[in-house]
Image (cartoon, rainbow, N blue to C red):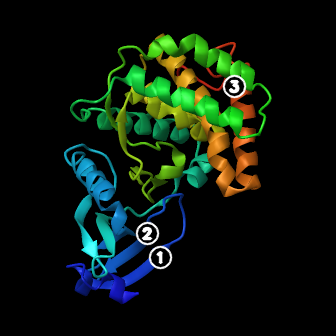
Amino acid sequence: MSKIFSDIPSFHTWDIVEKINKGWSKDEKYYIKAIDGNELLLRISDISQYDNKKREFEAIKKLGDIDILMSRPIDFGICNNGQLTYSLFTWIEGEDAEKVIPTLSDKDQYQLGVKSGEFLRKMHQIPPKKNQVSWEKYYNRKINRNMTNYKECGIHLGGSDKIIKYIEQNRYLLASRPQSFQHGDYHVGNMIVTKSGELGIIDFNRFDYGDPWEEFNRITWCAGISALFASGRINGYFNNNVPELFFKLMALYIASNQLSSIHWAIPFGKKEVEVMIKQAETVLGWYDEFQTYIPNWYLPNYIE
């Protein structure tokens, strides 16, 4: 094991190296504790991913001046005699948010949701790359691909016709949408809660650039464990002034995501496919089979 890391410049300062076996990323992840007590996160990828990982590392560096509790980039390079690429980050100590949040008081669930929305708004201050293709063009292609993959995957979702109808009727909303930096997978599964009750954001490896509101396509995982947290996330993002257009677009992005998730899950096995079908059925219930664009769990305000 040590031979893999031995040509990382700070390797000689490491005292503990423990593999982390969680998450969907193809990266190998390690918890590092240095001799001086500093804790680090190490991500290892095949050298074929060098360009992608370098872009990821440089993109995360752009968040350096933003006040968010997150793993900060420290070092990037090549190791294991040129066979692997590594990214080194600061470590955030905490428990998985998806486990902690349901155990909290209603007030704390909502307030952490507000904080997650405020954090996301700060991330979206980072502008997109130059010469980005228009969002309307890009996302319509994505919708077409999602629909084709769903129809050809051989798995039928009851109510999919309602999902597709809503998507087709609301594609026009994609016109002239702004773009920004995106976390890429923003939900409770990529958040932690510290011992002091602070919210931390992790796993930026799916970062992208696009419509900032598309980041709410995975709020389904937040709402699934806490309507208060999910509502707080929306209200915090918009500082309690949520435009109607947002809900229409969020419903569009969530609808498209339900179709894509079923095809995506197939390589992971029957159990994962069943998880995605169940979530899609839940989403259909939230939106009254997409007869409405505001989910039934949403709370416009929180009163203790």
Question: Marks 3 and 1, how far apart in space?
Answer: 39 Å
Are the two marked residues, 3 and 1, in contact with CB atoms closer than 8 angstroms?
Answer: no
Mark 3 neighbour class, 10 Å CA radius: few under 14, some 14 to 19, many 20 or more: some
Q: Residue at x 37, y 45 (%)?
A: 207
Are the two marked residues, 3 and 2, in contact with CB atoms closer than 8 angstroms?
Answer: no
SS state under label 3 = helix
The x, y position of residue 99, in whole percent, is 60, 54
The x, y position of residue 5, in whole percent, is 32, 82
Kind of residue indicated by mark 3: Trp
Left or right position of 124 against 189: left
Are the two marked residues, 2 and 1, in contact with CB atoms closer than 8 angstroms?
Answer: yes
Kind of residue indicated by mark 1: Lys
Q: Residue at x 32, y 22 (%)?
A: 178
Mark 2 neighbour class, 10 Å CA radius: few under 14, some 14 to 19, many 20 or more: many
Q: Residue 43 sits in which quadrant?
A: bottom left
Question: Marks 2 and 1, how far apart in space?
Answer: 6 Å
Q: Nearer the viewer, residue 194 or 294?
A: 294
Using the image, determine if residue 268 lies above or below residue 295.
Answer: below
Q: Which residue is mark 1?
A: 19
Point out the frontmost of discs 3 and 2.
2
The x, y position of residue 300, in whole percent, is 54, 19
Name the quadrant of the N terminus.
bottom left
Q: Nearer the viewer, residue 222 or 138?
A: 138
Q: Which mark is residue 286?
A: 3
Q: Nearer the viewer, residue 89 or 300?
A: 89
Q: Which residue is mark 2?
A: 29
